[in-house]
């Protein structure tokens, strides 16, 4: 057991999720059980708050309010898009030393885990004893080594609830519907739309993920076939779909007018452009009139009142486990979730940070159908338990038809 | 009391809502209590189903399944965008006669109430005894004579939950956020975004509704001021905002490239264009980088698992009351909701159909602030009870700041 005395620092990085505060609260409450912990600090706005020495003292929070914040989506400690380099990490490390931080827990995705890796190396080089652990979080579900990531289940539930409604709506007033879902490189969240299917003609009838090259002609043929078969067509598309050369469809369809951020990353979220361009492609290519596109946008990751209870509990547990690994085993690394039983149990392990840092996990081949326009039964079995309990179900009338009198 | 023996016909028109099936089930279950009712038919796809003689027999449904459908969003009997003219209504009337329909209940908005008016007139002219009653439904909340309309409370809850999440998200990763909300002529649903406010810096900081002329220069000055004050800015905009000449902003910003339907109506929903154009206006006008827009789209009216229990109960009651007015009082008209007590009770009345048919109600002046970029306390008091019970609440950390050591 670690007898290293000092403070705990916890921070959140990257995009918010429905359950990221659970992990922070898991750290705060668990850490206070250990006598060697002199205080639990939270960094405001992630690594930026460390640089700015902007800390709050979570040891001076009531348990009741911590629990209320745990049940609130988005980042209670606020977040940042800063991606620390070596020099940035050196400044962080200096602040940590000044405040006698001896345990650093960073809740985030693969960029955040890379930050943990660098800080840990610098502490080792400076002979400063520091436990540094990455706590997984991402609605994209794209962290290596994890069966699934905290944050994904709740976002998947949002997408599946949205498509349950879309199925009902577009059946009532028939047309083509496109729902654009977050996911730059991994299609898990888009695939979750399929978890909404109940009746045989329920959609999404077509699902396009970044793991498969998008071909406009094949897309039009797919839509034409589904529309003919069902009389309407519901489509789920990842914002990051790209052609066979890896060129994002949003760039291709916009013809160079697209927008990029400071890192040179294409802006995919916070715009309805991809959905609108695909709508136009269908209208022109198939001559269909009622084609509608919604871009689910930021609602996917922060809509209050839609979370998976299983996801929330696991997000709490990865926070608790991170503290336990650091305190009892005196080790560094990244907490990962394993699933020994498909339906359903989980185990938590600590793996070396190199196995997660800066890497991206994609959907395995057996989750995507052969045509590359839908998911497999394997994916449905994988995804269903992650939605949590009491998923709202759609019901249809079963009343018999009345015989015609006039139009016989 | 009406002793007119014959069948009941119920149908749904226009866009779905979260609770429209409650009204149909209210009609079906209430009508079966009256011995003069020989059967309760449902028309499939609204008035189109009447023309096509496409009926289901709701008398041959189980109560359990009716209750399950009542709790499901969207139109269980399916819907239509057909707007019947005199000739169309004459064909409907012929089918009704053939099936001995003596009671016609049509759940819908102002177009649907106009259909009820025409059918009723034709029946009278043909000396065919028919009770025809319009049952209110619209997420736009724009029916005359009603304090509020069934369907609005649940859609308002969706918008308020969405903005609660947006407040959390855009506070964590600061920028400008625009949420585009449904509403062609009435701003009630956009205004509901304000019901999300809890903390003093919560948004939306700016709300733009169709009832006030939209001025781009004033808009930019508003955004600049709010962004400077809060460090971020959340904006709610109705899809139907128009300039001082009544030209929709989407037309104006698109410069004539916009899309129209068969009726010549501008396509406002199912596209992210307005949000994207307003984003660009802010980026260019104020030089801000992180500007994001989401268009809430069809999720507003059909997202499963997000409904106001009060709205659901009232939607059930207007269905029941419609039957009671027809059976006990032997009259035609439109059921309306009054609110004798602000917080909170309702009464139901039947008013002559002319008072509702084809008319649009707008937000009253005292619901909109003087600057035309926000709502008043009066609106908040009006809207809050409509969200129903157990509205999910956001919580913030209250931990004290830690004194700086290095940056003193």
Image: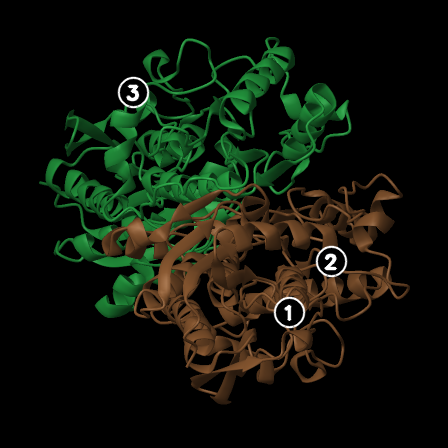
Chain colours: A brown, B green
**SS state under label 2:** loop
Residue placed under numbered mark 2 in the picture: A240
Q: Residue furthest left?
A: B1
Identify whether B121 is placed above or below A117: above
Identify whether A113 is placed above or below B305: below
Residue B255 visible at all: yes
Q: Residue furthest bottom?
A: A341
Between the C-alphas of marks 2 and 1, the distance is 38 Å
The answer to whether marks 2 and 1 sit on the same chain is: yes
Instruction: Classify 10 Å Cα crowding around label 2: few (below 14), some (14-19), many (20 and above).
Output: many
| Coordinates of residue B49 in the picture (x, y in percent) | 47, 52
**SS state under label 1:** helix
Q: How many marks?
A: 3
Marking on residue B377: 3
Residue A173 visible at all: no
- For marks 2 and 1 on the same chain, the one whose residue lies earlier in the sequence: 1
Residue at screen point 25% across, 56% down? A63
> Viewed as shown, does residue A162 lie left or right of A120?
left
| Coordinates of residue A217 in the picture (x, y in percent) | 86, 62
Between the C-alphas of marks 1 and 3, the distance is 58 Å
Residue placed under numbered mark 1 in the picture: A124
| Coordinates of residue A93 in the picture (x, y in percent) | 60, 55
Location of residue B385 by image quarter: top left
Residue at screen point 56% across, 65% down? A193
Of the 4 image quadrants, the one containing the N terminus of chain A is bottom left
**SS state under label 3:** helix
| Coordinates of residue A257 in the picture (x, y in percent) | 85, 38
Marking on residue A353: none
């Amino acid at each position: 057991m670690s007898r290293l005395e000092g403070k705990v620092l916890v921070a959140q990085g990257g995009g918010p999720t429905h359950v990221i505060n659970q992990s922070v609260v898991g750290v705060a409450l668990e850490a206070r059980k250990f006598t060697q912990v002199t205080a639990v600090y939270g960094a405001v706005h992630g690594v930026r708050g460390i640089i700015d020495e902007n800390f709050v003292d979570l040891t001076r929070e009531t348990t009741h309010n911590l629990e209320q914040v745990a049940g609130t989506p988005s980042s209670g400690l606020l977040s940042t898009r800063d991606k620390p380099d070596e020099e940035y990490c050196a400044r962080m490390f200096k602040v940590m030393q000044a405040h006698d931080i001896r345990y650093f827990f960073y809740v985030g995705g693969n960029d955040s885990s890379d930050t943990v890796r660098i800080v840990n190396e610098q502490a080792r080089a400076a002979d400063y004893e520091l436990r540094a652990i990455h706590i997984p979080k991402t609605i994209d579900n794209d962290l290596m080594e994890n069966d699934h990531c905290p944050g994904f289940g709740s976002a998947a539930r949002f997408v599946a609830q949205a498509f349950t409604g879309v199925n009902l709506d577009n059946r009532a007033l028939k047309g083509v519907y496109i729902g654009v879902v977050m996911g730059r490189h991994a299609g898990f969240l888009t695939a979750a739309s399929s978890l909404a299917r109940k009746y045989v003609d329920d959609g999404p009838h077509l699902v396009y993920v970044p793991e498969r090259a998008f071909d406009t002609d094949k897309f039009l043929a797919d839509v034409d076939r589904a529309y003919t078969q069902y009389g309407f067509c519901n489509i789920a598309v990842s914002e990051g779909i790209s052609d066979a050369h890896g060129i994002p469809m949003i760039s291709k369809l916009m013809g160079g007018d697209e927008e990029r951020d400071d890192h040179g990353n294409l802006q995919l979220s916070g715009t309805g452009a991809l959905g609108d361009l695909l709508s136009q492609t269908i209208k022109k290519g198939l001559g269909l009139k009622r084609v509608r596109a919604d871009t689910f946008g930021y609602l996917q990751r922060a809509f209050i009142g839609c979370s998976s209870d299983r996801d929330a509990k696991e997000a709490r547990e990865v926070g608790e486990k991170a503290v336990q690994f650091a305190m009892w085993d005196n080790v560094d690394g990244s907490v990962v979730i394993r699933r020994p039983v498909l339906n359903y149990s989980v185990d938590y392990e600590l793996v070396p940070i190199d196995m997660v840092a800066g890497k991206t996990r994609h959907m395995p081949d057996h989750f995507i159908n052969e045509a590359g326009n839908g998911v497999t039964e394997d994916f449905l079995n994988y995804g269903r338990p992650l939605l949590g309990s009491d998923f709202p179900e759609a019901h249809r009338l079963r009343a018999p038809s009345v015989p015609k009198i006039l139009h016989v």
